[in-house]
Amino acid sequence: MRVARWAAVAVAMVMVGLVALLATRDASRNTAAASPLISKPAPEVIAPDLDGTTIRLSQYRGRYVVLNFFASWCVPCAREHDDLQRFATRHGASGTGDAQVVAVLFDDEPAEARAFFEERGGDWPVLVDSRGKVALDFGVRGPPESFVVDPDGVVVARIVGEVTDTGLDRLIAQVEAER
């Protein structure tokens, strides 16, 4: 009986330590992850945006693309949104700069995404992936998840979790230095 009590106390202490560690650590940000798409041409994306205009990933050749899978209900997506806005502004959100953010709606309704962008801002294309084909082609498990595609259309990074504008800048600078 005494051994069982001490074992229970030891297990409880380990559990309390684990909970404390998980509760106090920083959220996952700019966490690069493996993908079979890295160093390969990005799958072609052809999907309507929130206004019904057909968007193709290939129309952004010549620029870096941050393909960001997001949902309006996703708390980390809301947290990373300001960073995506800063990045888009710095790199030419109008489509004339060296990088473009393109969002892909993940398991969400277009009306909810419109409300999200009306409330928080952001003027990049938001693609409606109603059947989940784009997410499936990229192997996305859930938002937020982002892929960085280089100007030649090659996937150079997969980021699971939130992105930061400075993290994206560092990633692009690293890719440029390796070219």
Image (cartoon, grey):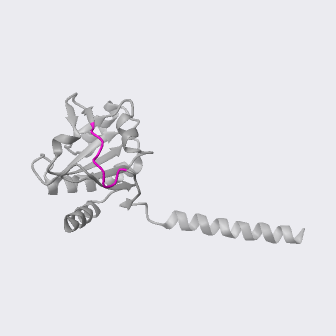
Asked whether, in this view, residue 40 is left or right of residue 51, the answer is right
| Residue at 9%, 48% in the rendered image | 96
As drawn, the residue found furthest toward the right would be 1
Answer yes or no: is residue 172 visible.
yes
Asked whether, in this view, residue 6 is left or right of residue 80, the answer is right
| Residue at 20%, 41% in the rendered image | 58
Residue 48 figure quarter = top left
Asked whether, in this view, residue 171 is left or right of residue 109, the answer is left
Q: Is residue 44 magenta?
A: yes
- Residue 174 vs residue 25, the one in the foreground: 174
- Residue 16 vs residue 173, the one in the foreground: 173
| Residue at 39%, 51% in the rendered image | 36
| Residue at 29%, 63% in the rendered image | 167
Q: Position of residue 28 (x, y in %)?
A: 42, 60
Q: Position of residue 140 (x, y in %)?
A: 41, 45
Count of labels in the image:
0
Q: Position of residue 177 (x, y in %)?
A: 20, 68
As drawn, the residue found furthest toward the left would be 96
As drawn, the residue found furthest toward the top would be 52
Quadrant position of the C terminus in the picture: bottom left
Decide: is 72 above or below 2. above
Q: Identify the magenta region.
A: 37-45
Answer yes or no: is residue 71 visible.
no
Decide: is 177 above or below 90. below
- Residue 2 vs residue 32, the one in the foreground: 32
Quadrant position of the N terminus in the picture: bottom right
Q: Is residue 79 magenta?
A: no
Q: Position of residue 26 (x, y in %)?
A: 44, 65
Asked whether, in this view, residue 17 is left or right of residue 160, the answer is right
Q: Main secondary structure of the magenta part?
A: loop
